[in-house]
Image (cartoon, rainbow, N blue to C red):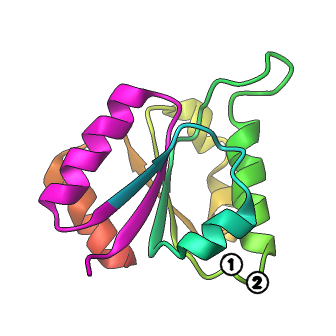
Amino acid sequence: MSTCILVVDDDLAILDLYEEILEFGGYCCVSSITPTLDVDDVAELAPSLVILDWFMSGSPAINASQQSIELITRLRQCPRTAHIPILVCSAGGAHLHVYDDWLATQDVALVEKPFHVSMLLGQIAALV
């Protein structure tokens, strides 16, 4: 059985692209368009890696990065998911790097978009 990777992104076209890339790399891709995942569902899926977009649309009252922060926090606080590597892939640039210290404390890896497929697959291989 291939390694299962959970991808969370609010853009369906990007999710399709990840699926193609991951299948090319020999991985199984499970995708979610919402960052408000139930941690128990993630634990049941038991992915070897979570790939997460940083800026996702949501309620206008919620900062675009807040949903990602909340998901990472919930995953890290749950004993059944705390060990799962997380890779943030985002085109956030300087807006994302404001969170570098926090991401480091959460043991979250970062790949900036746009990326080369080989670089992404190399980072995934290092994490799983």
- Residue 61 in view of the camera: yes
> For the residue carrying disc 2, how many other residues have a C-alpha within 10 Å: few (<14), some (14-19), or many (20+)?
few
Q: Is residue 4 left or right of residue 22?
A: right
Inter-mark Cα distance, 2 to 1: 5 Å
Which amino acid lies under the numbered mark 2 shown in the image of this protein?
A: Pro
Whether residues under marks 2 and 1 lie with C-beta atoms below 8 angstroms apart, the answer is yes
Secondary structure beneath dot 2 equals: loop
Quadrant location of the N terminus?
A: bottom left
Measured as percent of width and height from the top left, residue 67 is found at 73, 40
Is residue 58 rendered magenta in the image? no
* Left or right, residue 26 beside residue 102: left
> In the rendered image of this protein, does residue 73 appear above or below residue 33?
below
Residue pointed to by mark 2: 79
- Report the residue at 48% width, 72% height from top: 47
Q: Which residues are magenta?
A: 1-28
Question: Is 128 displayed left or right of 54 in the figure?
Answer: left
Measured as percent of width and height from the top left, residue 57 is found at 64, 24
Which amino acid type is shown beneath numbered disc 1? Ala
Residue with the most extreme top position:
60
**SS state under label 1:** loop
The crowd level at tag 1 (other Cα within 10 Å; few <14, some 14-19, many 20+) is some
Asked if 51 appears above or below 116 in the picture, the reply is below
Check disc 1 and report the residue beneath it. 82
